[in-house]
Image (spheres, grey):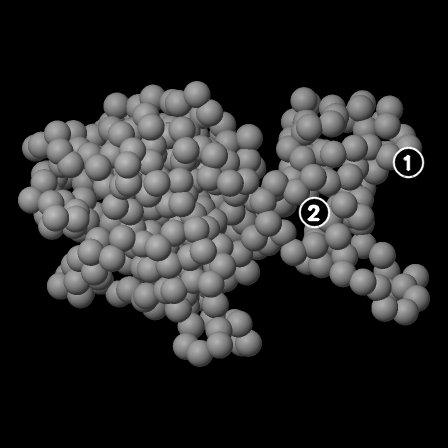
Amino acid sequence: MEHLLTLLEELSTCPGPPGGEEPVAQLIRHYLEPCCETRRDGLGSLIAEKKGTSDRPRIMLTAHMDEVGFMVQSITAQGYLRLQALGSWAAGQLPGQRLHIHGSRGPVEGIIGAVPPHFKKGERGELKIEELLVDVGASSPEEVESLGVRLGDLMTPVSRFAVFNTKLLANKAWDDRAGCAVLVAAMEELGRHPNTVVAVATVQEEVGSRGAVTAVEVAKPHVAVVLEGPPADDLPGIAKDSPQGALGKGCQVRLYDPSTIIHRRFWEWVTELARRRGIAHQIAVRQSGATDARAIHLAQGGIPTVVLGVPVRHAHSHNGLIHLDDVQATLALATAILEELDEGQLKTLLPA
C-alpha cells in the first residue's frame, strides 16, 4: 500500500505534457529496469518486456505518460504569453490558475489572466483558449526571454499531491498517471505467468494517440490491455441515469467509445474474471472520448483490446480526485488478466 501511494504521488507530480514526457519516462524506467528489459521507440514511448513460461501470447499492457498541458504560442509586446492547448481543456476553468512554464533555466511560474468582475460589462460569449494570457511578471518580450522562456516551451498545471478523507487522492495528471502507476505495480508484482508481457508507457495520447501508433508496431502484441484515467461521471447532473464511472465503485471496464467498439469476447471474459475473483468493477458505454485503444486495436490486422480505467473526478483540470480502492481494483484485475491469459484462452477470443 505504501509503495503504491508513493508511485501515485511521484507519477502525478512529475511534469509530462505531450512532447515533454521524458521526466515521466525516466521515472517509470527507474522502477521497471530491475524486473524488465527496457527500450524506447522513436517517438519516446517506453517499452518494458517481461517473459513468462511461454513466448505467446504477447500481451501489451499500456498506459499513456502525457498529461494535458500547453505550449507557448506567442509572446505579446507587453510580456504576456499566449497558449497553445495540448489536449482538451475547458477554457472557462482556466482564468486565475497557475502554470509551470518549463523553460531553459528551469520552471517559471505564471498565472492565467483573470478579468475581475468589476471590469466585465454585460454577458460575454464562450471563452476561448486563444484569448487567454499568461502573466509571468514580465513587461516585455526581452524580460520573458531573460527568464529562459521562449516559443515552444511546454507548460503544466501547478498542483500538489494530497489525501482527502483517507482514500481520495488529489493532484493533477491522474489521466493517465493513475494508469501508469497500475502498469508499474502490475509489472513489479507479476510472478509466474503463461505469456510474455510487454508494458508500454506511450507518449502523446492526448493529441491523438500518436505514441500508440508507433509503439504497437514495436511491441507486436497478440492482445492488449489499455489502462486509463477516464472522467468520472458521479458529479450531480452529469450522468443521465446511474453513473458508469463513480469513485469508490471499482475498476471501470469500457465497452464502447466513439473511437473503439471493445472486443466483445474479451470484455466478457474480463468481467467474468472480475466476478470470479471478487474484484469490484463497473461497466461503461461512453458517448465521448477516446483512448490509445483506437490505434492499437486497428494495428497488425486487428488486435483484441480491452480498456480498464481508474475514474477521475474533475479530469482535465488543475486538480483531480481518484479513489485508492479503484486503483487497487484496477491493479487486481490487470494482474488477474496477466496471470490467466494463455494461448488457449486467447484462441477462444479470436474469430473461428
Q: Please indicate, yes or no, whether residue 64 appears anywhere in the rendered image.
A: yes
Q: Please indicate, yes or no, whether residue 324 appears anywhere in the rendered image.
A: no
The crowding category of the residue bearing disc 2, from other C-alpha atoms within 10 Å (few below 14, some 14 to 19, many at least 20), is: many
x then y, percent, for residue 204: 50, 36
Q: Indicate the quadrant where residue 166 lies.
A: bottom left
Q: In the image, 155: left or right of 65?
A: right
Task: Identify the residue at image location x=37%, y=30%.
Answer: 215
Residue 261 versus residue 212: which sits nearer the camera? 261
Q: In this view, does 280 lie above or below 128?
A: below
x then y, percent, for residue 323: 40, 61
Q: Indicate the quadrant where residue 280 lies.
A: bottom left
Residue 270 versus residue 97: which sits nearer the camera? 270
Which callout, 2 or 1, points at the residue further toward the start of the chain? 1
Task: Identify the residue at image location x=28%, y=36%.
Answer: 301
Q: In the image, 147: left or right of 37?
A: right
Q: Are marks 2 and 1 in contact (CB under 8 Å)?
A: no
Q: What residue type is labelled 2?
A: Arg
Task: Identify the residue at image location x=65%, y=56%.
Answer: 90
Q: In this view, does 247 lie above or below 203?
A: below
Mark drawn on residue 9: none
Q: Which amino acid does label 1 sit on?
A: Gln
Q: Nearer the viewer, mark 2 or mark 1?
A: 1
- Which SS class for mark 1? loop
Q: In the image, 338: left or right of 53?
A: right
Q: How many marks?
A: 2
Q: In the image, 3: left or right of 163?
A: left
Which residue of the protein is positioned furthest toward the bottom in this rendering? 241
| Residue behind mark 2 | 98
| Residue behind mark 1 | 78
The crowding category of the residue bearing disc 1, from other C-alpha atoms within 10 Å (few below 14, some 14 to 19, many at least 20), is: some
Cα–Cα gap, marks 2 and 1: 19 Å
- Which SS class for mark 2? strand
